[in-house]
Image (cartoon, rainbow, N blue to C red):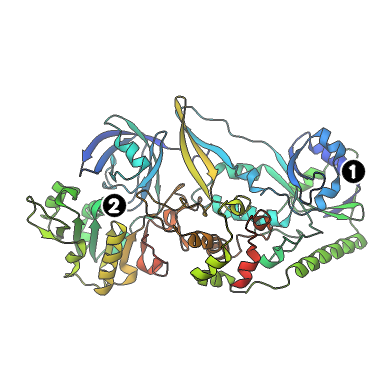
Amino acid sequence: MIFVLDEISFRNLLHQWLNSYKIFVPEIFDGQKVPNIAILDKEKLEKFSLSVFENIRVWEPLKAIFSLPKEKVASFGNGEDSKEREKVLLIGAKVCDLRPLAVLKKMYLKEDFVFEEFKDRLENTLIISADCPYPQDTCFCNLVGLKPYVDRDIDGILPDLNLSFVDNKILVEVFTERGEELLKERIGVRKEEAEREILERRNEIRDNAYFTLKKINEKELKEDISKKVLEGEKNFWDKNLESCVECFGCLYVCPTCFCFLLSDYQVEKHYERIKVWDTCYHPMYARVAGGLNPRAEFYKRGRNRFHCKFSNFYFDYNFYACSGCGRCFSVCMGKIDIRKILLGL
Amino acid sequence: MSKLFKVIKAKILDIIDETPTIRTFVLAPEQEFSFLAGQFAALTCLGIGEGFFTPSSSPYDKEKIEFTIMRVGRVTNGLFSLKKGDYVGLRGPFGKPYPLEKFEGREVFIVGGGVGMAPLRSLFLALLHDLSKYKKVYIRYGARTPRDLVYKNSLFEWQKIENVDLDLTVDVGDETWDGKVGVVTILLDEIPCDVNTACAVVCGPPLMMKFTLQKLLEKSFREENIYLSMEKNMSCAVGMCGHCRMGRYFVCKDGPVLTWQQIKDIEDPFI
């Protein structure tokens, strides 16, 4: 079911959702091209421009909402903390934000072991995705099998609703029962079922976005890139990663990077186990006690990122652990473009 | 909070000095803790962190669990500062056990180096539980010096068991040693079992693993019958954190024991 809403109705929806949910939205500051993630409140809503949803993905990887950069995962000798059950509404997620959640889901929700904090947050977060009508030069979701809009579940992640902005109207596509509930019995919300004409217009905007993206990234990745990536020789990686300053920025902003490290600390008279995001570019990442390090040389760490995302993960789950969001080279001080490396293989 | 990373408490019942740098910690978990031979566990030295070790005791011993540990890093230093009566944290078991069902009716050729004998002791004790199921069990064990051999008393007892063939060597002998001298691969010059069907199980330091593997292949053991214990950096032990990634495998989830057939295409698997 696809509904058409006007701006006032959508604002009324946001206003009412604020009563029940913690709402994350993109927020853009003057002069910025790329929005940041922000928590919406009633004051912010007054000045909130809906056009922000038409920007590309936010700077921050949305994994930060589901697997916090730093969080306590166990404590000893201090009783149990209560389980969090905050209801969250994440509005404006792009297709390149959804695949990463599918990656995290594969990694953290296994048959025999479940990362409960992640599961809890995923279950308690309603996702409202948004089309991405204006891809930028950094975007390459088309190279990894995605399109700049959401018309189906993305590798097993189905948003509850999807937004498309068409000529001052907002098309709201309902994907789930939870999404349907979000629209039910709302005051001051006029919604009509979308008719053919406006749907055709939406498709036109979507096709244009995809066309733009294909113009940005004309050359496709080789079909057997998952094998090619393993064949790269030392010289290839040395040359292509030469300008890396090992700041690890690319991996911290990468929404599909799932690695973490557990560390224990004494806090007064009890002990806490803390989980922090980790990155395989770190020289100590794979070092074992005693000093041996399978990835002591940088090219081995550098290529590991490619092996992980484009070969190992693909081999296990049949989709790349990359969504083409372009965050990695947006932050890269060495201007390393992942696309160039992949196309060079 | 997540049950995944919580530990159960285990009291240290005894600490046995095996060598100057290796101790066996005998633990009594406060809750039931069952494992199969070859599976590993996370030991927490409270406030310092976790280390990952395969138990060295029999999986059939439900009263206590033993870990034989070499002092090499931060966590093991912490563990070595503990005394009888202190507590550690225990999490697990993790990973896949040795495939004992595949060993049935066959000769099992165990090769250990140094502290690598720890998981092999657990395997041997599991085999010993019903030795009649296996054609014969061979143990080939080497350490740097006679002082570095672990389980000295047990080794000499095991030598007396029928259907068990045990041979030892040390890299450098001393006045107490009248056995063989040389690296562990000298014990593989003569292979008394049928290499077409025998299963070789190897655990030890990386170089020893590398050269033992070479020798086993030279002697025509089948690659699918060579079981190798892999040591990798770990953090979560449940296949989530990424640290123990080794090619297509997560050593914590797919291992810690992998066959040579599984890992032969991986560059430098023993580093």
Which kind of residue does numbered mark 1 sit on? Ser
Percent of width and height locating residue B166: 15, 59
Query: Badge 2, how many Cα within 10 Å: few under 14, some, many 20+?
Result: many
User: Is residue B105 at least partly visible in the picture?
Assistant: yes
Q: Nearer the viewer, residue B86 or A186?
A: B86
Relative placement, left or right, of B108 versus B244 is left
- Element type where label 1 sits in the image: helix
Q: Which residue is mark 1?
A: A9
Q: Quadrant of residue A313?
A: bottom right
Front residue (pair B20, A142): B20
- Name the image quarter holding the N terminus of chain A: bottom right
1 vs 2, front mark: 2
Residue A212, quarter of picture? bottom right
- The residue that appears at 67% across and 36% down in the rendered structure is A86
Tell me how many marks there are.
2
Task: Name the residue nearer the viewer: A198 or A44.
Answer: A44
Name which residue lies at 46% across and 60% down: A297
Q: Which residue is mark 2?
A: B119
Query: Is disc 2 placed on a helix, strand or loop?
Result: helix
Q: Chain of mark 1?
A: A
Residue B123, percent across and down?
Answer: 27, 54
